[in-house]
Image (cartoon, rainbow, N blue to C red):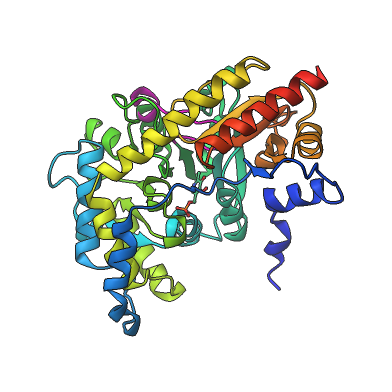
Amino acid sequence: MNPLLERLHPYPFERLAALLSGIAPPQDRPYIALSIGEPRHAPPAFIGEALLRRLDRLSVYPKAAGLPELRAACAGWLERRFKLGAGAVDPDTMVVPVNGTREGLFSFVQAVLDPADGGLVLMPNPFYQIYEGAALLAGAAPYYLDTTDQTGFLPDLDAVPEDVWRRCRILFICSPGNPTGAVMDEQYLQRVLELSNRYGFVVASDECYADIYLDEDAPPPGLLGACLRAGNTRFERCAVFHSLSKRSSAPGLRSGFVAGDAAIIAGFRLYRTYHGCAVPEMVQLASVPAWTDDAHAAANRLLYRQKFDAVVPVLAAAMPVQRPAAAFYLWLQTPCDDEEFARELYAREHVTLLPGRYLSRDHAGGNPGQGRVRVSLVAEIDECSEAARRIARFVSAIA
Ligand SMILES: Cc1ncc(COP(=O)(O)O)c(C=O)c1O
């Protein structure tokens, strides 16, 4: 077997299952899972209807490049959502569909990295674990950029040593961020672009939460818009990752896309031809209306906003809580060790959430996830409110 497989870390949910095994939670209250970030709002009916209408495509091998109508819909959404201006994104050379961003993030690294080069892949810490797994399996070393309350939950780019920048081949950024919900502003993105310019690394910008934000008047900026404002109209060395999993609450569709630098996209497309991960055509065709219609995404956003409005005051009565700018997580500071918090909460209240340390690595003398838990507000509002009451009761009981 490939020895690099042994370098992979157990997935956070495996660690959670091990932590909770053998515990008998109280059966008088129904189980509530706030641990997994799987959207559970109903996806818009038109996606399923479009899928059914295109079942004839079961008899077609899809192509890695994707259908022109999907690429056009993705480019059109990017131009609307990030105010790029018509024609800023060439759908034929700058966009490629992927089976959700998870698959896209992983395969992108395999296509971009030179395995002989010994380079580094920089990523936030805590993070979405695929960044790390992709780097490890490509034979590269991950380098962790801690995000804490002192850094505004964004990597402190100015704290990265010069020799690390020199060895950096890919910088992963994630805005809005999982698990913190932090958003990179224009100035931050410009700094990222300056560094990429100076050191020549590729920026992989995971923007899969781009359509989940709490202030309707302040949609988070994205990397492509920052490129245009910096005069980088060809998006050189930049790629963004987008998904229908969060925007349209359709994680089972496995539909997303990568867009950016045409030279990178061309290599990525070639890689995908061999990897055999083209998106099925009925999925592509069902994705077209999902990227074209923005009303369902606004309605979806409203549901998350209502949940934050309901949950935050209940928790705030018992513990410190910060309403994030975007995404659907709370990154709560725990009054005790995060694993103990998660275990005891399950044992006493039948609620699961993720210990922060499962989403981050020990680095620079500490673990930025320690003493925090990730609460995922994906359940319906009543269930989220009930879970908040149970967490508040639990915190008061252990105080
Ligand atoms: C930060 C981040 N990136 C990517 C993904 C993958 O999403 P998908 O593959 O469904 O697009 C997730 C899923 O939770 C995520 O949190």
| Res 267 quadrant in image | bottom left
Magenta residues (range) = 175-189
Q: Position of residue 222 (x, y in %)?
A: 33, 36
From the viewer's perspective, is residue 206 above or below residue 46? Answer: above
From the viewer's perspective, is residue 256 above or below residue 238? Answer: below
**Residue at figure coordinates x 31%, y 74% from the top left:** 63
Q: Position of residue 36 (x, y in %)?
A: 60, 46
Which SS type dominates the magenta stretch? Answer: loop
**Residue at figure coordinates x 57%, y 35% from the top left:** 384
Q: Is residue 172 visible?
A: yes
From the viewer's perspective, is residue 247 above or below residue 223? Answer: below
* Quadrant containing the C terminus in the rendered view: top right
**Residue at figure coordinates x 55%, y 26% from the top left:** 311
User: Residue 339 magenta-drawn?
Assistant: no
- Tell whether 69 sits left or right of 274: left
Between 104 and 29, the one nearer to me in the picture:
29
| Residue sticking out furthest to the bottom | 59
Q: Position of residue 374 (x, y in %)?
A: 63, 35
